[in-house]
Image: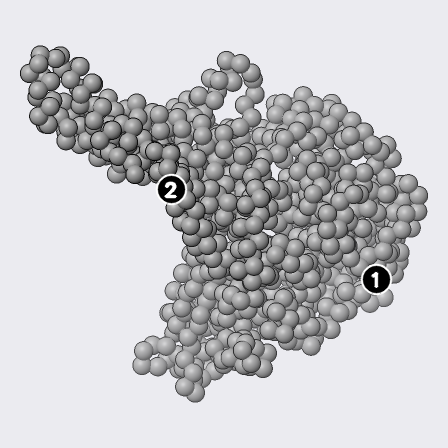
Amino acid sequence: MSQYVLRRLMIAIPSLLGISVVLFVVLALAPGDPFSELATNPNVPPEVQAALRAKFGLDDPIYLRYVHWLNAMLHGDWGFSFVSRMNVDTLILQRLPATLYVIGSAQILALMIAIPVGVYAATKPYSLFDQIANTLAFVGFSLPTFFTGILFILIFSVTLDWLPFVYTTDIKGTGIRWVLEMIRQAIMPVAVLGLFQAASMTRFVRSAMLDVIRLDYVTTARAKGLGQAKVIVKHVMRNAMIPVVTLIALQMPAVFGGAIVTEQIFRIPGIGSLLISSILSNDTPVVMAVTFVFACLVVLFNLIADVLYGWLDPRISLR
Amino acid sequence: MLDKELRSMIGKVKDGRMDRRAFIQRLAAVGLTAPLANQILALGGVAMAEGASTYKPTKRGGGGALKLLWWQGPTLLNPHFATGTKDQDGSRLFYEPLACWDPDGNMKLVLASEIPSVQNGLLAADGTSVTWKLKPGVKWHDGKPFSADDVIFTWEYTKDPATATVTAGVYRDLKLEKIDDLTVKITFPQPTPFWADAFVGAGAGQILPKHQFADYIGSKSRDAPANLSPVGTGPYKFVEFKPGDLIRGVINPDYHMANRPHFDSIEMKGGGDAVSAARAVIQTGEYDFGWNIQVEDDVLLRLEKGGKGKTIYAVGGDTEFIALNFTDPNTEVDGEKSSMKTKHPLFSDPAVRKALSMLVDRDSIKKAIYGRAGRTTANFLNGPEKFVSKNTTWEFSIEKASKLLDDAGWKPGADGIREKDGKKLKLLYQTAINGPRQKTQAIVKQACQKAGIDVELKSVVASVFFSSDVANPDTYPKFYADLEMFQIPLSQPDPAQHMRRYHSRYIASKENKWQGTNFPRWVNKEYDAAIDAADKEMDPIKRAALYVKCNDLMWQDTVFIPAMHRLKVEASANTLRPVISGWANETDNIFDWYREE
């Protein structure tokens, strides 16, 4: 087992290197530069523009810049933002709590809806409940979040005036009032993202359950006289959950990566909005760090999913 | 006209020996309109008057929290590293200049105690030096006294090439001298009629504390802790900063202006887009003020119905223009298109340029796109008022344009496109990607088509179009197209910097890596001479006349077709009384903002 993990980690190194080369080259070749706004500023003499480019190493050849970047990354230096003039890791850590809170809650909400609904729908396939759940799931994942987000804002903020639609990180008040405010402002983004996720996940859970529920050992369990609840929870679910666990594990990087569209609509200062604003202002070090960390997380959670597989189903051997 | 006689007449009016009406009549007799005569009269009087204040509250504080929404949040808080006005806006909450600009373009004192003028002896009559008197008793937020040393230090800091500040251009040619703790003398390398660039306004003028930055000058500049936690003299003290997301400040109880500021705390939230920012201010009232609401007018009108806020407008000198290329973008000479060695095959005929300017339907552009945020104009230079030409006109007429082209020998070919000597009237028209710009392109293209001109539209991502990337062919200074449209903001209430760009000395070419500012590559000796004269002219009337002449030369040659004189648009809560100047950053007058109950 530990040998397997070690070997997987060794394999991850070249693939991460490959990813970083591709990311770096693509970003370096992309048009535009971070000091574009200065071009129309009459106060900035050309020498200063040249000095800035030199200072941030933009004039070096690509391979040199890559070597510098890789070397710094290995020493734990994630880079220095052109636009904010601060270390990228500080910038990312500042944004992480909001993303973890909102996207994490949305994932939990999605699971809390998807598993019970999916399981119950699978036990009674083609019943009225199943039909309704299926239809809603279909509607849910057909509606993009930028649409439902604005719809929610129009209904709950503009018309009913119940919820705020600008997410603030510095809520006044302490204790219970702070907690309540935090929950109140997160309701809309969490609902928008959570319902979207829940929709596709419900269908996944349902089909995973249906695959297992027809197997012979389930019939055997029923024949032994076990109650319906026990059969479903103890015998069917445990086996049906294997692919679901993989799916959840692979969703985990997204919790750290943020949700670009939803964060933008509700002004949540998360990783997603950091990424998009950095892309728009050509702040390459930040884009590079965020995308690379995201790549690392994907590789890591893939490994975790594989390890979990072996633990859930001992028949799968890891060699 | 601008001779001794006029000057003595102005003198007479000032002394009361001649009445205003007689003066205007005398000028009308020689063909000058009444508004222009009035303008001349105002100019001849005091060169710069301090702007009046509209501030009403009679005590400091008590205004609660002021919540500002900047849909592009500031990403750093050192004004001399600002990569856009948003960073200057954020820094200006804490740092201050010596003076700033009010909505009418008049100077308002902040850290200075007196407006320099020739009369009070602070301004040299030949324009080679200006002396600033500082307000006594001003303290930095950490309690240290503010003095002339800080002003001198800011100059040393910004002019150091290793610091690489974006304001270096303002400061590098100056010489500063400390007269005493509260007096600083600035000496200019040549006579400088517009002496209020350094240390004035949020754009370049914000003064840094020496004791915070002294160790971080030059190449160490990026390590200064104060880059992220400013210590200023401003109305609000710094509390917290999250780049791109949030700036928080609290009232400065020791602020140097009486009864100010009105608000107990301030918050500037970033992120999102302009439409939802307008909604959060106008419709739901979650925020008090929304910055730069570039949203179509009918959307704003709909939001304003029964809303909690409204839009406000500030007039400045920003002109959205269509520039004409005077060189050939399709012929490559020595690895460079649009080279000065070529002439534009179509635009070298003035009739084509004139016809094009008749095909830009400015009324429709205003009606369909800019609404209340635009004014139609024939001028490239649209402010300040005293520099605006009254001699120009514009009209939209497809018939007249067609006739003009017919007379010049451009006859429609078999495909309906006009041609002459085998050259077809086919144009490439480029601009940055931005909703209103694409709509304007469509309006112009339609009219051109009716007149037999084929226009191909091209839009380039803003970050490329405005970049200094030498390798990219799509940047505006390269101008590898026949027409291009954008605007260059007029960032101070003076046209010198703005108009100097089109001197033939500054032509953008491969030789200077396209860093020259004259991108239409227009050469006019008369224009060059007028600019050179204006740069040295200390007499405000003659100087204004020179810039009016420059504008008129551009109009005669159709270098630019002004599509719209754009106004600043902001969203404000109904009870908020913000002070917004078209000549300055939105937060430049933040100390005068208050809420009416």
Q: Are marks 2 and 1 on the same chain?
A: no
- Whether residues under marks 2 and 1 lie with C-beta atoms below 8 angstroms apart, the answer is no
Q: Amino acid at mark 1?
A: Pro
Q: Quadrant of the N terminus of chain A?
A: top left
Q: In the rendered view, tell whether residue B299 sits above or below residue B537.
A: above
* Residue in the picture at 29% in, 36% down: A318
Q: Chain of mark 2?
A: A
Q: Is residue B574 left or right of residue B233?
A: left
- Quote the CA–CA distance across marks 2 and 1: 70 Å
Tell me which residue sits at (9%, 12%) in the image: A225
- x and y, in percent, of residue B569 in the image: 55, 44
- Give the quarter of the image for residue B399: bottom left
Q: Position of residue B175 (x, y in %)?
A: 85, 56
- Residue that carries the numbered disc 1 in the rendered image: B189
Whether residue B183 is visible, yes or no, is: yes
Q: Image point 86% across, 39% down: which residue?
A: B147
Task: Identify the image quadrant of the C terminus of chain A.
Answer: top left
- Vertical placement of B366 versus A277: above or below? below
**Mark 2 Cα-neighbour bin, 10 Å: few <14, some 14–19, many ≥20:** few
Tell me, for residue A7, which label it has, or none: 2
In the image, farthest residue toward the bottom: B421
Q: Can the viewer see residue B490?
A: no
Q: Chain of mark 1?
A: B
Nearest to the observer: residue B270 or residue B45: B270
Which of B142 and B66 lies nearest the eye of the viewer? B142
Q: Is residue B83 left or right of residue B414?
A: right
* Residue farthest toward the right in the current orientation of the protein: B180
- Give the image quarter of residue B454: bottom left
The residue type indicated by label 2 comes to Arg
